[in-house]
Image: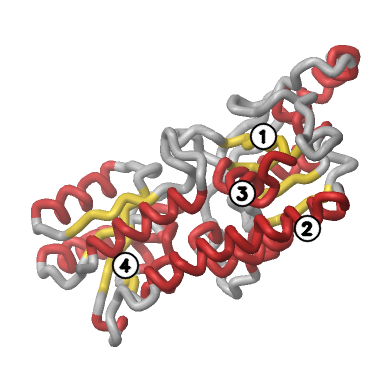
């Protein structure tokens, strides 16, 4: 479920002209002009041949591809800045070049990263994966990177597609995905039942439904008034009645924690966070992309789970 208004993206179209002008340079085998943090496009695969070029819409999905592909992939994550908003991102010329050279693309889907659809169209020779479609959670919430079972399915699909692209490394990709899923299973065991044997008795509220799937795995109840969550996510004014209801939940200490999307800050969310802290209610910050300095999905999600566990003690 994503009711935010996304901006129209024209930069990817204009980037085609840049591609035409830079075709000779790209053909020379020099470094690719890709997003910050990408590797040399001509870097050799230790097992022989060139690394598989992959483009992911965000560094969350880029980190999953890296975990599965290991040193046999070269991943470019378009959104790799914690302050960037995938809902309104406008692609650049270097993004378009990376997409053109990609053998595999991985986007979130569900309206979360609409900018990527036009970009993926330029990856004419690439295998294309969409996380929301693979996770198949049966829920309209698009933040599927917080669904650990969903991420496991995505890891399997990444391994399968990489294996099709580079058959000689198929077993390695499968083994990497299995190891990755072993770690997500440990996280699932850790998070399951954080709400106790009767999870419905543990209530939390959230500034946005970003960590919905994690809360569901923890068996806690999100008591956020729907009108509040929908208004914040749609970047609209929060109805006075909904805001008052949230304030009453906090003041009466009827919730155990406030789950705060640290990447979407408004006067209302700041006010709610302040109220929670003043009331002695734990505030758990969650994000939509990897925090600064973090490159590993498991390390990031472990920290998120630990923060939630600490708040629900």
Q: Can you identify the residue that label 2 sits on?
A: 171
Tell me how far mark 1 sits from mark 2, CA to CA: 23 Å
Q: Earlier in the sequence, mark 4 or mark 1?
A: 1
Say what secondary structure mark 1 lies in.
strand
Q: Can you identify the residue that label 1 sits on?
A: 76
Which dot, 3 or 1, sits closer to the camera? 3
Q: Can you identify the residue that label 4 sits on?
A: 224
Task: For the residues labelled 4 and 3, say whether their Cβ atoms are less than 8 Å apart.
Answer: no
Task: For the residues labelled 1 and 2, say whether their Cβ atoms are less than 8 Å apart.
Answer: no
Tell me how far mark 3 sits from mark 2, CA to CA: 14 Å
Residue 194 location, x and y as percent? Answer: 31, 73
22 to 110, vertically: above or below = above
Residue 88 location, x and y as percent? Answer: 56, 38
- In the rendered image, which quarter is residue 160 located in? bottom right
Determine crowd level at label 4: few under 14, some 14-19, many 20+ residues with C-alpha closer than 10 A.
many
Residue 286 in view of the camera? yes
Residue 151 in view of the camera? no
Determine crowd level at label 2: few under 14, some 14-19, many 20+ residues with C-alpha closer than 10 A.
few
Which corner quadrant holds the C terminus? bottom left
Q: On residue 126, which mark appears? A: none
Residue at image x 32%, y 42%?
A: 266
| Foreground residue among 222 and 198 | 198
Tell me how far mark 4 sits from mark 3, CA to CA: 34 Å
Residue at image x 25%, y 77%?
A: 202
Tell me how far mark 3 sits from mark 1, CA to CA: 14 Å
């Amino acid at each position: 479920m994503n009711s935010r208004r996304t901006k129209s993206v024209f930069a990817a179209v204009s980037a085609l002209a840049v591609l035409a002008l830079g075709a000779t340079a790209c053909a020379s085998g020099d470094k690719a002009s890709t997003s910050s943090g990408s590797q040399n496009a001509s870097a050799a695969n230790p097992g022989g041949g060139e690394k598989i070029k992959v483009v992911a819409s965000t560094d969350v999905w880029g980190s999953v591809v890296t975990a599965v592909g290991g040193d046999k992939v070269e991943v470019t994550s378009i959104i790799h800045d914690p302050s960037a908003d995938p809902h309104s991102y406008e692609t650049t010329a270097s993004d378009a070049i990376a997409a053109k050279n990609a053998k595999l693309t991985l986007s979130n889907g569900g309206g979360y990263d609409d900018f990527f659809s036009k970009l993926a169209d330029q990856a004419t020779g690439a295998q294309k994966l969409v996380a929301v479609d693979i996770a198949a959670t049966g829920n309209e919430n698009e933040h599927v990177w917080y669904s650990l079972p969903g991420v496991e399915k995505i890891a399997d699909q990444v391994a399968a597609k990489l294996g099709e692209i580079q058959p000689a490394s198929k077993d390695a990709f499968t083994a990497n995905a299995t190891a990755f899923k072993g770690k997500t299973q440990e996280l699932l065991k850790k998070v399951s039942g954080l709400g106790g044997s009767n999870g419905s008795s543990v209530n939390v509220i959230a500034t946005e439904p970003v960590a919905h799937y994690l809360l569901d795995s923890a068996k806690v109840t999100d008591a956020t008034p729907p009108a509040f969550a929908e208004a914040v996510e749609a970047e609209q004014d929060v109805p006075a009645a909904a805001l008052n209801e949230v304030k009453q939940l906090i003041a009466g200490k009827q919730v155990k924690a406030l789950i705060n999307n640290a990447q979407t800050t408004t006067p209302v969310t700041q006010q709610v966070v302040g109220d929670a802290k003043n009331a002695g209610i734990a505030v758990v910050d969650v994000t939509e992309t990897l925090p600064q300095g973090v490159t590993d999905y498991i390390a990031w999600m472990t920290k998120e789970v630990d923060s939630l566990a600490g708040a629900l003690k």
